[in-house]
Image (cartoon, rainbow, N blue to C red):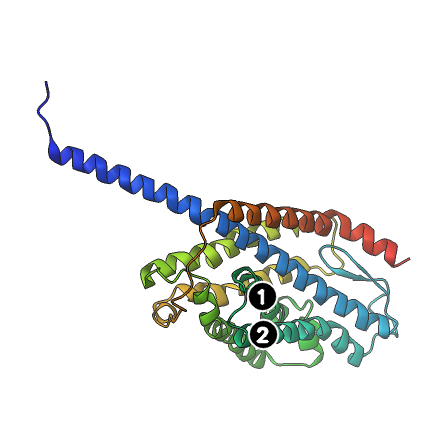
Amino acid sequence: MEPFDEDNLDEKYDLNLRESWIVKSMARFLPRMVISMAIFMVTYLLVWFIYQMAVIVVGSVNNIPSVMTYYEVRWTIPNDSPLWTDLNIIAVTGSGPLISLLLGIFCLIFLKSSPKLEQMTKLFLTWLCLSAMSHFFGAFVAGALTWQGFGYVIAWMYLPFAVRLVISVLFLAIMVYISWLLIPVMHSLAPAQLGKKELRSFLATRFVIPWFFGTGILMLIKIPNTLPQHENIFIYDIIILCSLAFAILPMLSVLFIRSAKRPRHFTEKSDDEERNLMLSVWLTITVMVLLIYRFGLNYIMNNLSR
């Protein structure tokens, strides 16, 4: 018979306790992480659609016909058509970023002025704000690199390289500042009982990881199935998605975490039934939106344009 080893028993107990904590933490945070990723993808596509519709409407006002696809707005007139002028090129290609900026500002003001919003509403508006801001500030950077979208405004304003570089760096810095402005909102989403070390993990599972995997999924479904009219439009969209890193990753910095001031009355709900219901609802919405975007958009817009 082996001698009784109390230390070994303690080690096994600690290991089982640690494994149990990991399983419970995953069961708690994984559904919310998936919900946040779903909301991110839905809000991104919502902003993308508003951006494209603004471009189409302004083009239509200038008698420039177009067709929307899931990867670009196709113009049905040649580039050398007399319908194109310097002014309407700037108006058409700048309308999408401008409406995105206005939407982002509205969401930011609403979030800052309405601290008692329901948690899911805060999360939705936060993602909507960040996605909208990236379609202006990130779109400028993308346009400066690819000469697509917002890049036509840059080209027709004849901005020299040094000016484009300075504005691009400034706009990426503004993305960081927007994240800083949203710190109270982001921190208010976390349970009050979390310490500042745990807060970093919470923000990672609620924002950083959802953005990372959501961006990967969006990249895959945005790959054009035919040769685009605008050669670098796919890269343009990817840069906009990646520009969100300047708003998302700083959340994990020491400076951002140390500034945490959260309402002490809020405790995260642990109702498994409610959480699973929200997970099912948002997964259903996201799958439907992705399917409509990827497969239904061409059919719907082509029929509306007839």
Residue 130: image quadrant is: bottom right
Mark 1 Cα-neighbour bin, 10 Å: few <14, some 14–19, many ≥20: many
Task: State whether residue 58 is above or below residue 230.
Answer: below
Residue type at mark 2 is Phe
Mark 2 Cα-neighbour bin, 10 Å: few <14, some 14–19, many ≥20: some
Q: Which residue is mark 2?
A: 110
Q: Which residue is mark 1?
A: 125
Task: State whether residue 294 is above or below residue 76.
Answer: above
Q: On the rendered structure, is 49 left or right of 136?
A: right
Q: Residue at x 88, y 72 (%)?
A: 63
Q: Residue at x 77, y 53 (%)?
A: 297
Q: Residue at x 47, y 48 (%)?
A: 271
Pinpoint residue 9: horizontal percent, then vertical percent. Answer: 17, 33
Quadrant location of the C terminus?
bottom right
Pinpoint residue 106: horizontal percent, then vertical percent. Answer: 62, 75
The answer to whether any part of residue 232 appears in the image is no
Q: Are the two marked residues, 1 and 2, in contact with CB atoms closer than 8 angstroms?
A: yes
Q: On the rendered structure, is 91 left or right of 6?
A: right
Q: Say what secondary structure mark 2 lies in.
A: helix
Pinpoint residue 177: horizontal percent, then vertical percent. Answer: 48, 75
Pinpoint residue 85: horizontal percent, then vertical percent. Answer: 82, 78
Q: Nearer the viewer, residue 114 or 27?
A: 114
Task: State whether residue 147 is above or below residue 166.
Answer: above
